[in-house]
Image: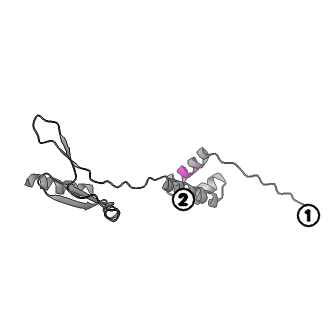
Amino acid sequence: MADAEIITRRRKWRPEEKAALLAEVEAEGGRVSLIARRHGLSESLLYNWRSAWKAAASASRPEPVAFVPIGVIDGTREGRPALLTGPEHPSPTRGDREDRVSKIDIELPNGVRVRVNASVNEKALSRVLRVLKGAV
């Protein structure tokens, strides 16, 4: 038997090519093996690209923003510009701020206060606010 020489070449993939192949995987419902066979690639290569893409996407997400109440705009004065009044509550401490990051406080003009979690269903909150507006 004759000696055989195996030559391997490592292909350099451009980001556009990787993105196109990953888009094709998603279009096929995540079936990596089908796309790998179609293009003569290793499944592990597509899995590695996909996990690297997901890691990069999650790393670029900004951190959540915490709002601190600074005052209320009072527009009830006729013929005068609206005034900014200071907060009624003392400034929150660091621990208080951390507790309130995922909370939303809504104080209505009639004194009713609505406190919800940041993941509240928007439609449900809208219905509650409409009912409270009608009760005033």
Q: State the extent of the magenta-drawn residues as a range.
A: 20-24
The image position of residue 90, as x and y in percent, is 24, 58
Toward the viewer: 94 or 75? 94
What amino acid is at disc 1? Met
Q: Quadrant of the N terminus?
A: bottom right
Residue marked by disc 2: 31
What amino acid is at disc 2? Arg
Distance from disc 1 to disc 2, alpha carbons, whole Å, reads 41 Å
Q: Could one spot residue 13 in this view of the protein?
A: yes
Residue marked by disc 1: 1
Element at label 2: loop
In terms of image quadrants, where is residue 50? bottom right
Residue 83 against residue 94 in the figure, above or below? above
In terms of image quadrants, where is residue 128? bottom left
Query: Which of pointers 1 and 2 lies earlier in the amino acid sequence?
Result: 1
Left or right, 90 with reference to 110: right
Element at label 1: loop
Q: Residue furthest left?
A: 136
Left or right, 84 with reference to 76: right
Q: Nearer the viewer, mark 1 or mark 2?
A: 2
Residue beneath the point at 26% across and 53% down: 69
